Image (cartoon, helix red, strand yellow):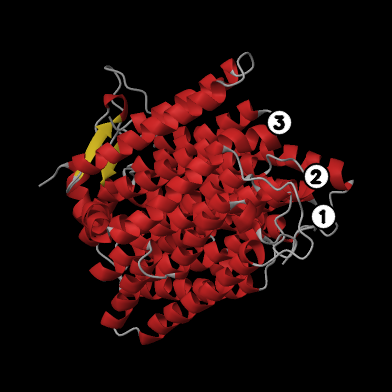
């Protein structure tokens, strides 16, 4: 149980970083932390104590196996996270070219 | 038939960048043809689905083990909205993008990806699959918001991306917790397992809270609305029309009601949250809109306010309220995308979208003037245009359940909306120009065609609203009212 709570704590750290930090790059890192927290949570949800890999075979009868579904999901989730991070970094670089800064306080032409 | 909704736009999205390098008009022709075909399929699907649902097992793996796609009346409503607006926005883009932006090939690729993602969200019957399509849509729309790569657009896109990613993370977290709880991802199967375990489980409530936060962020409901007013105006006009008319509804409202009504189960507490989110959004959105002088920003704030009506109507939980909410969702997609296209036309012709800088456009641009008048009257709820009937239904529904405060707020917000759009009409179109600018021309044909079609739809839906309600809206509302009946439709258990 405490592991799950630690996941939530990690998620909250990422969220804090994403919302409060003023630097665009730090915000992107915060998003990364958030995604890792969720990935970790998924993997933990599939974990079983002293379990084996779920490989189907005639000779072996595996009764206690790890849930393979979350692992498959996490592969997808990591790839999606990569895409979002790549796009974010690309936009951050373009923003740097326009404003010559990563500081969110100086990048505020939009308001109202 | 069901996979076509995703396969067509996804196929074009990969075909266009390959060919458009060599052939200039190919991307445009492809995208418009694909859009038209999608409209045909979604109109046809209205007649296939009367009650219940059609399912399609991806790769032949039967539900609940494989991924399943599922088409019921609610999906059909959303598919209609997505594909009609998407097609008309593509027609509009033909001239608009050519004149104002470089690399149209990339634009059409991203637009097709956006359509694929949206259609996928609407037909997905698997929670994680839905999340993947949601991310496809989100990434395409982040990129489209930044498409102009000017300073403001990049800034808006970054802001949108930060808040959109938080929303996606919350939704994925909720999916993870549900998966840990019931060990399945099929939406109907989750609903069945949750029903066996009985109501009032704290974990399920936690998931419901995470889902509500995530989808409300995507929908731009009021405590979560800050990104919307930056992101929607920054995009190219047809994309703003898609974002305001379709994306916030599909990613926000549709998924929210699907998860809450069909999977987790609607309750009094949910109704309370929906109704108050709706009321706050209505009021705050319209108050923020009054002071705006940027045409598109004003429209973006009105989107928040109108989405408030939708959530309020659905949140009442009565049959009439849900019909009103869904009907308003349908109407809002028509008139709000029309207004964004008008704003794009004004910007296209004059080079600015500040309302105080343009004047007397209805002489030079009669088509834009008339269509924007129709759209403004629709959004303000003037009979017999479409916005009037849906607002009327919502207000009657609020009176039925004795929610007098909500009904009065609906009326008041409608008045303020009218005032705000009279301002738009007065400044941009009606008043005499003090120092008239010469050389303002009406926009090209393709832009006119799509604006006129949307205006005709606004008037047509208003005049023939009983037909629309009976064929499209009522069956969709029945899906929500049936609640966990949904399990039997998808899994086929009697």
Number of dots carrying numbers: 3
Residue B269: % across, % down: 36, 74
Q: Is residue B303 above or below residue B58?
A: below
Q: Secondary structure at mark 1?
A: loop
Disc 2 to disc 1: CB gap under 8 Å: yes
* Front residue (pair A27, B381): B381
Q: Secondary structure at mark 2?
A: helix
Image quadrant of residue B118? Answer: top left
Image quadrant of residue B447? Answer: top right
Q: Which mark is residue A95?
A: 2
Q: Is residue B81 above or below residue B369?
A: above
* Other residues around mark 1 within 10 Å, as few (<14) / some (14–19) / many (≥20): some
Name the residue: 64% across, 44% down. B236
Q: What's the CA distance linking mark 2 and mark 3? A: 19 Å
Name the residue: 36% across, 37% down. B39
From the image, tell me which residue sits under label 1.
A107
Q: What's the CA distance linking mark 1 and mark 3? A: 25 Å
The answer to whether residue B226 shows anywhere in this view is no
* Other residues around mark 2 within 10 Å, as few (<14) / some (14–19) / many (≥20): many
Residue B174: % across, % down: 45, 54
Q: Chain of mark 2?
A: A
Q: Which mark is residue B102?
A: 3
Image quadrant of residue B35? Answer: top left
Q: Residue extending furthest right? A: A100
């Amino acid at each position: 149980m405490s592991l799950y709570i630690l996941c939530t704590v990690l998620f909250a750290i990422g969220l804090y970083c994403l919302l409060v930090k003023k630097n665009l790059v730090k915000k992107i890192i915060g998003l990364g932390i958030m995604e890792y927290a969720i990935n970790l949570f998924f993997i933990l949800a599939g974990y079983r104590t002293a379990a084996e890999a779920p490989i189907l075979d005639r000779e072996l009868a595996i009764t206690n196996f790890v849930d393979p579904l979350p692992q498959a999901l996490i592969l997808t989730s990591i790839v999606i996270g990569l895409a979002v991070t790549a796009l974010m970094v690309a936009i951050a670089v373009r923003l740097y070219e326009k404003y010559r800064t990563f500081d969110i306080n100086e990048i505020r032409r939009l308001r109202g | 038939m069901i996979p076509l909704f995703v396969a067509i736009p996804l196929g074009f999205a990969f075909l266009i960048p390959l060919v458009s390098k060599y052939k200039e008009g190919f991307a445009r022709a492809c995208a418009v043809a694909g859009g038209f075909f999608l409209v045909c399929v979604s109109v046809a699907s209205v007649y296939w689905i009367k009650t219940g649902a059609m399912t399609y097992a991806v790769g032949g793996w039967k539900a609940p083990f494989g991924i399943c796609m599922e088409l019921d009346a609610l999906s059909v409503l959303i598919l209609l909205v997505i594909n009609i607006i998407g097609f008309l926005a593509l027609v509009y883009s033909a001239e608009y993008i050519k004149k104002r932006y470089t690399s149209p090939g990339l634009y059409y690729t991203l637009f097709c990806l956006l359509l694929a993602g949206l259609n996928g969200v609407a037909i997905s019957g698997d929670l994680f699959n839905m999340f993947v399509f949601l991310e496809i849509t989100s990434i395409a729309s982040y990129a489209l918001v930044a498409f102009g790569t000017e300073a403001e657009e990049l800034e808006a896109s970054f802001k949108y991306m930060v808040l959109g990613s938080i929303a996606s993370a919350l939704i994925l977290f909720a999916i993870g917790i549900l998966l840990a709880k019931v060990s399945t991802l099929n939406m109907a199967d989750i609903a069945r397992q949750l029903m066996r375990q009985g109501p009032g489980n704290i974990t399920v409530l936690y998931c419901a809270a995470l889902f509500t936060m995530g989808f409300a962020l995507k929908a731009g409901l009021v405590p979560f609305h800050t990104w919307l007013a930056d992101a929607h105006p920054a995009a190219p006009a047809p994309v703003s029309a898609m974002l305001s008319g379709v994306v916030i509804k599909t990613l926000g409202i549709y998924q929210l009601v699907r998860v809450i009504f069909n999977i987790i189960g609607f309750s009094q507490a949910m109704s309370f949250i929906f109704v108050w989110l709706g009321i706050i959004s209505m009021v705050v959105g319209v108050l923020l809109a009054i002071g705006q002088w940027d045409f598109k920003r004003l429209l973006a704030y009105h989107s928040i306010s109108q989405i408030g009506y939708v959530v309020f109507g659905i949140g009442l939980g009565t049959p009439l309220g849900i019909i009103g909410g869904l009907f308003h969702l349908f109407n809002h997609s028509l008139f709000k995308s029309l207004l964004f296209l008008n704003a794009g036309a004004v910007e296209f012709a004059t080079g600015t979208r500040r309302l105080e800088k343009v004047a007397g456009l209805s002489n030079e641009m009669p088509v834009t003037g008339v269509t924007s008048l129709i759209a403004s009257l629709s959004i303000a709820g003037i009979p017999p245009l479409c916005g009037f009937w849906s607002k009327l239904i919502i207000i009657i529904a609020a009176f039925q359940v004795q929610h007098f405060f909500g009904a009065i707020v609906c009326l008041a917000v409608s008045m303020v909306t009218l005032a705000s759009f009279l301002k738009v009409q007065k400044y941009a179109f009606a008043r005499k120009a003090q120092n008239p600018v010469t050389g303002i021309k009406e926009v090209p044909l393709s832009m006119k065609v799509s604006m006129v079609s949307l205006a005709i739809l606004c008037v047509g839906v208003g005049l023939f609203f009983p037909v629309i309600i009976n064929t499209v809206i009522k069956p969709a509302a029945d899906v929500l009212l049936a609640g966990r009946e949904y399990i039997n439709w998808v899994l086929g258990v009697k």
